[in-house]
Amino acid sequence: MDIEVQLQQVFDLPPAQVREISQYFVEETVGKGEFFLASGQRADRLSFIASGIFRVFAQTESKEVTQWIGGEGYFITDLSSFLFDNSSRWQIQALTDAKILSLYRSDYQRFESLLPQWNVVEKRFIAKCFMVLESRVFDFISLSAEERYLQYFEQHKAFFNQVPLQFIASVLGMTPETLSRIRSKVGG
């Protein structure tokens, strides 16, 4: 997916402003297994995944928890750390070789003076992030493990051939054994 198309969808800006913003994104590569962000670091960039797959995870006292897996067409960062310049709770790691387009915080902060309506645009972006989170929480409390698996499989079929299943199980809030039982029962 093209960065300008994604910026248009996420920020709902006129094409001229989308082109202006897209010029601030810098192409970078991240190798398989490399970290985009480590726990305790400050997120200094918001990046668009042009190709590749990343996971967002944290280590608790007893286990590793994968919070999110994303691929082409998604943005990645620790939003709280990026916006408020605090230490990240999350680690973000490339699961495959990846190409990203990164917008650094210093350039992001310039948008307020470049784009008169940036505060409204930024508020809309953060609201969309919140809506995704709200939907995910609702799914966790309203869907069975099997329903969560079926929904995730339908939305992210390609991940099942490229991402270790224990990471997918963690995103879905289940053990790898539960995921395996569900997959045996329903296929996939």
Image: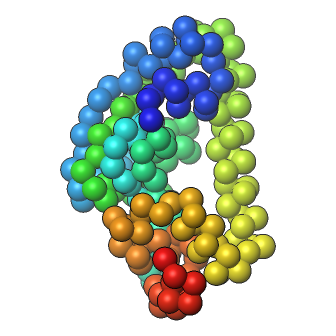
- Using the image, determine if residue 27 lies above or below residue 72: above
On the image, the x and y values in percent for residue 92 come to 38, 54
Taking the spot 48% from the left edge, 13% from the top edge, the residue there is 19
| Quadrant of the image containing the N terminus | top left
**Taking 149 as reference, is 66 left or right?**
left
Q: Residue 172 lies in what quarter of the image?
A: bottom right
Residue 118 place in picture, x, y as percent: 64, 18
Who's the residue at 47% across and 67% down the image?
66
Relative to 95, residue 29 above or below: above
Q: Residue 27's x, y, as percent?
A: 29, 29
Comparing 124 with 18, the one in front is: 18
Which corner quadrant of the image does residue 64 belong to?
Answer: bottom left
From where the camera sits, is residue 105 visible? no
| Farthest-out residue, front | 187
Q: Toward the viewer: 161 or 102? A: 161
Residue 83, quarter of the rendered image: top right
Q: Can residue 173 be seen in this view?
A: yes
Instruction: Find residue 59 and report its horizontal and vertical position in percent.
Output: 42, 71
- Nearest the eye: 23 or 88: 23
Here the colouring is: rainbow
- The residue located at (38%, 24%) in the rendering is 25
* Relative height, residue 108 to residue 61 (above, below): above
Task: Pick the residue in front: 8 or 118.
Answer: 8
Q: Which residue: 62% across, 13% down?
A: 14
